């Protein structure tokens, strides 16, 4: 079945550091790919998405590119802030109604 | 837009008891989803509704679980004869229903079965 594997955490960084969270997927079809984020005390919210190969999703300084050849969707941000501290989830959807999530990566940014 | 709300935020129950959770989606959203999340894992799909119709149920949803969305608005998730393995965060989400539409999640109901 469809599955997502993402980099284990926790990840601790200093402000202004570069962040990468690796995500690879297994799917039988041509899924859409997502990054969701959960800030402390809040519900999951969509960070960015890409619906076909070579698409780049971007939001709040984060980017991820849908790489079909490597079945990857790595999340990157060039300069993190303390406010980026959260749990990040990679997810895929092979149907338009069901998401399969990775285990999540906890990111802590220190001032 | 007040977002997706879930009630209660926390529920502690004894093994064997029944529990019911409520989800109020964003008012114009016709799709509603239930997910379950255990510690250190991502959310797992349980079921979803298009308006009042329950269109898919995961194999994770045993016979002890039942979900309803009687008028296509709020939804309830009931767990009968709870077991310790049911302890988890139960998340509700809604969407307007377009393809690849983003899901709006509630803050969840944390269930602890003693």
Image: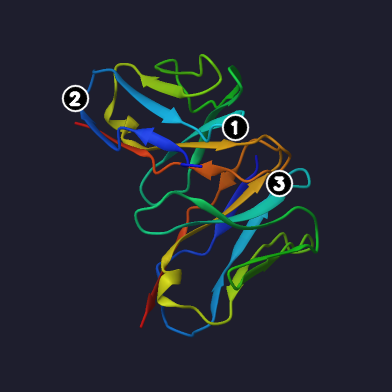
Q: Taking B99 as reference, is A97 left or right?
A: left
**Which class describes the residues within 10 Å of circle 3: few (<14), some (14-19), or many (20+)?**
some
Q: Quadrant of residue A22?
A: bottom right
- State the residue in front, A79 or A74: A79
Marks 2 and 1, how far apart at CA: 36 Å
Identify residue for label 1: B28
**Which class describes the residues within 10 Å of circle 2: few (<14), some (14-19), or many (20+)?**
some
Q: Chain of mark 3?
A: A
Q: In this rendering, is residue B71 above or below A22? A: above
Residue at 38%, 34% (x, y): give it: B6
Marks 3 and 2, how far apart at CA: 39 Å
Which callout, 2 or 1, points to the residue nearer the camera?
Answer: 1
Identify residue for label 3: A27
Q: Which mark is residue B14?
A: 2
Is label 3 on the same chain as label 2?
Answer: no
Q: Chain of mark 2?
A: B
Residue at 52%, 23% (x, y): give it: B73
Locate the N terminus of chain A and report the quarter of the image it occupies: top right
Which callout, 1 or 3, points to the residue nearer the camera?
Answer: 1
- State the residue in front, B67 or B102: B102
Please state the horizontal and vertical placement of residue A108, each as a whole percent of the image: 39, 72
Q: Quadrant of residue A90?
A: bottom right
Is label 1 on the same chain as label 3?
Answer: no
Please state the horizontal and vertical placement of residue B70, each as a whole percent of the image: 51, 14
Locate the C terminus of chain A and report the quarter of the image it occupies: bottom left
Most distant residue in the front direction? B1
């Amino acid at each position: 079945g469809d599955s997502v594997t993402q980099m284990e955490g926790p990840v601790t960084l200093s402000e202004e550091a570069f962040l990468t969270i690796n995500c690879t997927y297994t799917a039988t079809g041509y899924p859409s790919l997502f990054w969701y984020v959960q800030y402390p005390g809040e519900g999951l919210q969509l960070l960015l998405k890409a619906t076909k190969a070579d698409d780049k999703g971007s939001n709040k300084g984060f980017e991820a590119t849908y790489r079909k050849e490597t079945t990857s969707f790595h999340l990157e941000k060039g300069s993190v802030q303390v406010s980026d501290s959260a749990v990040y989830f990679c997810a895929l959807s092979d149907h338009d109604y069901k998401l399969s999530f990775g285990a999540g990566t906890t990111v802590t940014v220190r001032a | 837009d007040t977002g997706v709300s879930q009630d209660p935020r926390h529920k502690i129950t004894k093994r064997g008891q029944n529990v019911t959770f409520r989800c109020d989606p964003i008012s114009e959203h016709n799709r509603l989803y239930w997910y379950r999340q255990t510690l250190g894992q991502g959310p797992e799909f349980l079921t979803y509704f298009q308006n009042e119709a329950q269109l898919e149920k995961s194999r994770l949803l045993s016979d002890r679980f039942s979900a309803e969305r009687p008028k296509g608005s709020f939804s309830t998730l009931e767990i009968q004869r709870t077991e310790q393995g049911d302890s988890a965060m139960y998340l509700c989400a809604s969407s307007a229903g377009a393809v690849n539409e983003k899901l709006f999640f509630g803050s969840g109901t944390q269930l602890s079965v003693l």
